[in-house]
Image (cartoon, rainbow, N blue to C red):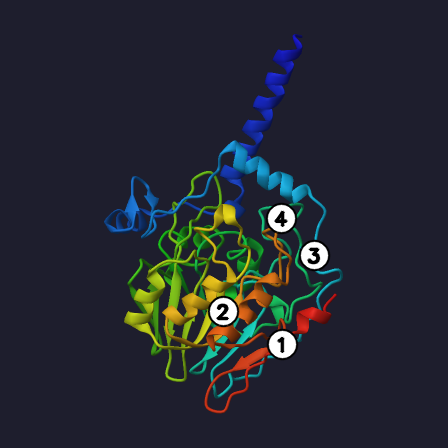
Amino acid sequence: MNVWLAIAIVLIIVVVTVYLYIRLHPIFGGRPSEETRKRMNQSGHYSKGKFINLLETSVDHGLKNTFSILRDMLKKDVGRRPAKPLKVVPYTSSSNPPETAAVTWFGHSALLLELDGKRIFLDPMLGRAPSPTPIVGGKRYSDRLPCEIDELPELDAVILSHDHYDHLDFVSILKLRDKVKTFFVPLGVAAHLERWGVHPGRIREYDWGEEGDLDGIRLVCTPARHFSGRSLSGNSTLWCSWAIHGREARIFYSGDSGYGPHFAEIGRKYGPFDLTLMECGQYDPRWASIHMVPEESVQAHEDVRGHVMLPIHWGAFTLALHPWTEPVERARVEAARRGVVLTTPRIGETVRLGPGAEYPSSTWWRTAD
């Protein structure tokens, strides 16, 4: 057999195998229902089969840029992850949520919010690696979680910001699905949950500007500047941030977002906020439009009219090329410069809100290595 023909056959087999794996494996999610597709087509943020940002937003996927990223990834690791596994603070739930609002950081962007007697998990990515397969993507910095999924209490809600693997984890949802009363998700994401066994009647889908209610807690699906996709079709589902208004506290969760004027608009419409959970890591000049640098994160906190800022999207995985502690160090400097109250809990440490609350502010990461 001709050598080139043999190579071509092998390549075809590889391509077909990968294609079938992506199309058939449930980890890549599902396709939106007819009802959801109708709502997508009615959205002002949807055009030609894809969701779009409020601002022109693009990432260079050209060969030159791709090769530069691969080159930098192959360079010697200069502190891109801790030298040893991070220690976490064990989380122990009580039979009832605390009387005052509280939030517990599980690393990256996973946060357990206890508000008005309800338990709400934001982007509960509790898996080992932020990728379709654990052999790529880099494993979690800590050997364990503050609390294993089967030890978690019943959850009144799970709120999702978008469908990327570091925010929406297949295995985590499989383990959580019977513990959760209601899922609040941006348009298109319900299809993934339904394919993973969540009953459609327990899922609520929202476009930007639409509001939901959780027994008196107002949930507003607000814009973000990002993108989406779990398989071959990008931007087929919506990404978002969330404004969460309870009696005890008002919380803003940024999800993933580049900086933009949408933060000031959110602040004008839905602020002020007692606490902002603001993305502050995994940035790079080559994707500056979809992830903020820490100085922009602090500016975004001020834009939404936040009081206390908790930096997230760091401390669990290496998804960019900066040192793992750089995001929080830069955020501390900028927050101090601007007079912003910054709280820096350890993974698993609970931050309580309300009159007289003391916010964790240690530099625990400096001794983590």
On screen, 212 above or below 321?
below
Type of amino acid at the residue the image marks with label 1: Tyr
Q: Which residue is mark 4?
A: 137
Q: Which residue is mark 1?
A: 91
Give the SS element for disc 4.
loop
Decide which of 361, 245 is in the foreground and name it. Answer: 361
Give the SS element for disc 3.
loop
Query: Which mark is first along the chain, 2 or 3?
Result: 3
Asked if the residue at tag 4 contacts the one at tag 1, i.e. Cβ–Cβ closer than 8 Å, the answer is no
Q: Quadrant of the N terminus?
A: top right
Asked if the residue at tag 4 contacts the one at tag 3, i.e. Cβ–Cβ closer than 8 Å, the answer is no
The answer to whether residue 222 shows anywhere in this view is no
Q: Which residue is mark 2?
A: 121
Query: Which mark is first along the chain, 4 or 2?
Result: 2
Q: Is residue 114 left or right of residue 87?
A: left
**Mark pair 1, 4: CA separation:** 26 Å
Asked if the residue at tag 1 contacts the one at tag 2, i.e. Cβ–Cβ closer than 8 Å, the answer is no
Where residue 207 appears, as percent x and y from the top left, is: 31, 58
**Mark pair 2, 1: CA separation:** 14 Å
Give me the residue at 63% from left, 76% from top. 91
Type of amino acid at the residue the image marks with label 4: Gly
Q: Which residue is mark 3?
A: 79
Where residue 25 appears, as percent x and y from the top left, is: 54, 42
Give the SS element for disc 1.
loop
On screen, 292 above or below 267?
above
Give me the residue at 51% from left, 65% from top. 178
The quarter holding residue 249 reads: bottom left
Eye-nearest disc, 2 or 4: 4
Type of amino acid at the residue the image marks with label 3: Gly
Give the SS element for disc 2.
strand
